[in-house]
Image: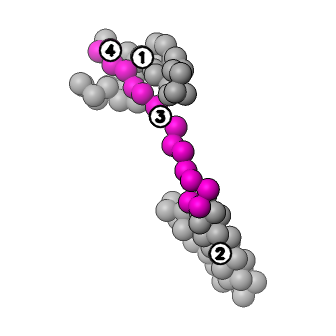
Amino acid sequence: MRCPTCNAPSEVESTRVTKENNVKRIRLCFNQHKFSTLEQPITLSKSVLLQQQTFISETQSRRLGMLRQGRLLKATTTGG
């Protein structure tokens, strides 16, 4: 992660998990700026997860059909 003050790379000095399952990290950049980050887990509802699984299944199904037809697929970074 880059330092918000000088944009230099940083390394983790310490890591702690809070009661709420958040991860707090104390970081020190290579120019000696100290800063912290807080990572919070994302909780998705069951309906959102089912929608994502359905989308993935439909996408995979389309790709499989295209492979059977002999079409060349191009990989993308968008996950679609």
> Which residue, as the protein is rendered here, is positioned at the far right?
68
Q: Earlier in the sequence, mark 1 or mark 4?
A: 1
* Label 4 to label 2: alpha-carbon separation: 46 Å
Secondary structure of residue under mark 3:
loop
> Which residue, as the protein is rendered here, is positioned at the far bottom?
69
Q: Identify the magenta region.
A: 33-48
* Label 1 to label 4: alpha-carbon separation: 7 Å
Say whether marks 4 and 2 touch (CB < 8 Å). no
Query: Where does label 2 land, which residue?
Result: 58
Secondary structure of residue under mark 4:
strand
Query: Where does label 3 land, which residue?
Result: 40
The label number, if any, that marks residue 38 in the structure image: none
Q: Earlier in the sequence, mark 3 or mark 2?
A: 3
Kindly identify the residue that appears in the image at 60 percent across and 70 percent down.
55
The front one of 27 and 31 is 27
* Label 4 to label 3: alpha-carbon separation: 20 Å
Query: Where does label 1 land, which residue?
Result: 26
**Closer to viewer: mark 4 or mark 2:** 2
Task: Give percent across and percent down for residue 36.
Answer: 37, 21
Residue 16 lies, with reference to residue 53, above or below; the image says above
Quarter in which the C terminus is drawn: bottom right
Say whether marks 1 and 4 touch (CB < 8 Å). yes
Kindly identify the residue that appears in the image at 52 percent across and 17 percent down.
16
Say whether marks 1 and 2 touch (CB < 8 Å). no
Q: Earlier in the sequence, mark 3 or mark 1?
A: 1
Query: Where does label 4 land, which residue?
Result: 34
Asked whether residue 61 is drawn in magenta, I would say: no
